[in-house]
Image (cartoon, rainbow, N blue to C red):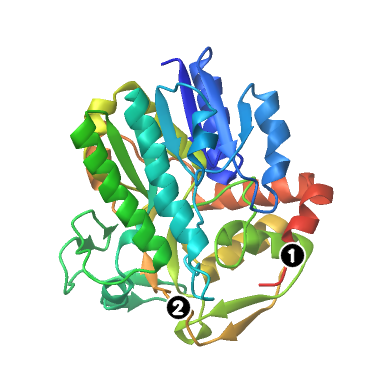
Amino acid sequence: MRAILVTGGAGFVGSWLAIGLKKALGDVRVIALDNLRRRGGELNLSRLKDAGVAFVHGDVRNPADLAACGAVDCIVEASAEPSVLAGYDGASRYVVDTNLDGAVNCLELARQHRALFIFLSTSRVYPVEALNRLRLVETDSRFEIAPEQPFPGVSPAGISETFPLEGCRSLYGATKLSAELLALEYGAMYGFPVVVNRCGVLAGPWQMGRADQGIVAFWAARHVYGGPLRYIGYGGSGRQTRDILHPADLLRLVLQQIRAPEKFSGRPWNVGGGRQVSVSLRELTDLCAAASGNHIPVTADPEPRPADIPVYLSDHTAITELCGWRPEIGADQIVAEVVQWLRDNAALLRPVFDQKD
C-alpha cells in the first residue's frame, strides 16, 4: 500500500479517516480530495496539513480532478451530498451528479489502478415506507422496535442487511444504493476488491452539523451557542431514535478492511452504533444539557418532514461475527466530545453554526 485517496477528505468523516489512516499507516501517502462546498470544510485543511495528509482541491464530478491525484492503491469514497432532504426543493442535479456520477468516476479510477475501493454508503438505502410500517414500542423517551414485525431482516437489535429494499427512499438513498450496486459490479467484472459499508448516523467533533444532516453536532451547538430547537414530526414528542457512530470506531473497521480486503469484499455491511449506541432526540437533549450545563427549551412541530422515519438502528451482527468489530464509544462520550470541541473552537465555529434550522 503506497497511496490512499480519500474523497470528501476535508469533510467530517473524510478528514477523520484521512488523518487516522496517515497516523496508523505511517509511510503510506494519504491524499484528501474535496471541493470545499460545505461550509466549515475549509477549517479542516490545517488539520490535514499538520497530519501530513496531501490536499487536492477537486471534485469527484470531474474525472480530471481525480486523475490529478496520481496512482493510488486504495480509494475510500467518502464524498457525498449527505442530506436526505436533497432534491425536495426541486434541485436534483447536485445530489445525483455527486453521489452517483461521482462514485462512477471514482470506480473508473479504481479500475484503472486495480485499487481497493471502500465505499461509505448509508442506512438510508432502506426504503422509507417499509421503515415507517415497523411495529414500535413507545417508551417515555424513545421509540423501540417491537419483537414481532411484518418484514424479515428486522428485530429489536435493528435493521439487518436482509431487510427488503423494495420501495422509495429519497434521492440521497437511491443514489447511494445505485452506487453500491455499480461498485459491486465493477469489482466483480474488473477484478478489484470492493467493500461497502452502510453507515448509520456518524457523529463527533469536526462535524459542521445542520438540522437535516449532522444532527448531534447541530443539537449540541444550540446548547452551547444558543438558538431554537424543535422536535419535528411524530407528534413533536422527540421520540424518534437513531444509532450513532463515532468516526474513530469507523476508522478501526476501515483499517481492518485495508489490511484484509478479501475478507470484506463483495457485499454490503451494516456499520453503525446499533441499539447499544443510540439516542432519541429527547435523550439527546438530556445528554447535551448535561454536557453543556445549559437547558434549551424545545418546541414541538408535530408534522413529519419528507423521508423521515421514527427509528433506525443498525443491526451490525454480520460484521461483528465476521471480524469482531463493534462500536466502543458511547453516546454520552460522543456528545461530551462535541460539546468540548464547540467550546474550545468557539471563535471559528460559532459563525458556521449560526444558521437557521
- Residue type marked 1: Asn
Residue 284 horizontal/vertical position (percent)? 56, 64
- In terms of depth relative to the viewer, which is nearer, 340 or 207? 207
Q: From this viewpoint, is residue 272 visible? A: no
Q: CA distance from mark 2 to mark 1?
A: 31 Å
| Label 2: few (<14), some (14–19) or many (≥20) C-alpha neighbours in 10 Å | few
Give the position of the N terminus as an image quadrant.
top left
Could you tell me which residue is drawn at 15 percent across and 64 percent down? Answer: 152
- Circle 2 or circle 1, nearest the eye: 2
In the rendered image, which residue does mark 2 sit on? 306
In the rendered image, which residue does mark 1 sit on? 294
Residue 353 horizontal/vertical position (percent)? 73, 60
- The answer to whether 307 is drawn above or below residue 204 in the figure is below
Residue 249 horizontal/vertical position (percent)? 45, 38
Asked whether disc 2 touches disc 1, contact meaning CB atoms under 8 Å apart, the reply is no
Could you tell me which residue is drawn at 64 percent across and 51 percent down? Answer: 37
- The answer to whether 26 is drawn above or below residue 172 in the figure is above
Residue 39 horizontal/vertical position (percent)? 69, 53
Give the position of the C terminus as an image quadrant.
bottom right
- Numbered disc 1: secondary structure: loop
Q: Earlier in the sequence, mark 2 or mark 1?
A: 1
- Residue type marked 2: Pro
- The answer to whether 323 is drawn above or below residue 27 in the figure is below
